[in-house]
Image (cartoon, helix red, strand yellow):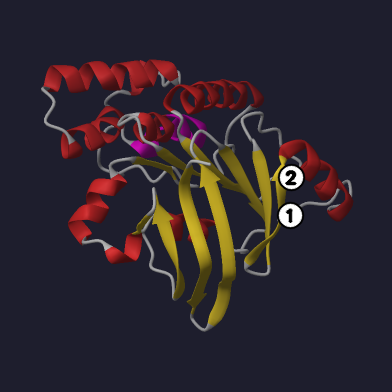
Amino acid sequence: MDIALEAHNLSFRFDGRVILEGLNFQLRRGESYVVLGESGSGKSILLRLLSGLLTPKKGSVEIAGIDLAAISKEALQAMRAKMGFVFQDAALISNMSIFDNIALPLRYHTGLRESEVQERVSRKMDLFEVDRKYDRSIPAQLSLGMRKRAALARALILEPELLYLDEPATGLGAEADRLIARVLKNYQEKARAGVLTVTSEWPFDIPIADRIGFLEGGRIVAEGPTREMRAWLEKKIPSGSTLE
């Protein structure tokens, strides 16, 4: 089994509050995994721990068998070039144009000529149907949905091996949701990328999900193939209730 990402006995506390405790997790190459949990259950913190943006109090995170705590800052920075991120609020740089936001990883991590940067950014914007009239707009001038599309384009611009998505469907309509699901599924299969999504939205329709894990009490208390977990979740979360 080709493991892209693995967490061992992961624990994290904030202001004395236990957020995660003894969490174990695996993501395989070419797999899409959805972590479902209530708001405040630690989903976003989990993403940051698994990407090396935060350091666990206990336990370890390994990417391709490499312990993130055992490598230099320079090596960790190089490893992040193989990761793509979409945060809940899109996290685009506020004073930078949409086009330059998407181009930033290419300009920072590669030595490509500007003409090649322009071409790659254009292709990704077209892929996610980011309206080109917004090329020189700053993020505040766009809807949340359009900012999310731009953030997804930026996340894929370096063709990452790992993709981290925090509430990716928030602010999107059904049509945009289907477009993004299709693009991500195609990318996952083509690049054999591991895709990790965290969300509190239930019920949801994420056709790219191979497995679902339920985060509760600081641990993933149940996980399995999407069809099996849907049945489990329907029993645990009564119809008409939410995780918010």
Q: Name which residue type carries label 1.
A: Leu
Q: Earlier in the sequence, mark 2 or mark 1?
A: 2
Q: Which residue in the protein does label 2 denote?
A: 202
Task: Identify the main secondary structure in magenta.
Answer: helix
Q: Quadrant of residue 120?
A: top left
Q: Quadrant of the C terminus?
A: bottom right
Q: Which mark is residue 243?
A: 1
Q: Which residues are magenta?
A: 139-149
User: In the visual, does 92 lie left or right of 168?
Assistant: left
Residue depicted at 12% across the width and 22% down the height: 114
- Mark 2, Cα crowd under 10 Å, few <14 / some 14-19 / many 20+, is some
Which one is in front, 193 or 87?
Answer: 193
User: In the visual, does 55 lie left or right of 143?
Assistant: left
Tag 2 secondary structure: loop
Q: Quadrant of residue 106?
A: top left
Q: Name which residue type carries label 2.
A: Trp
Residue 88: percent from the left, percent from the top? 50, 47
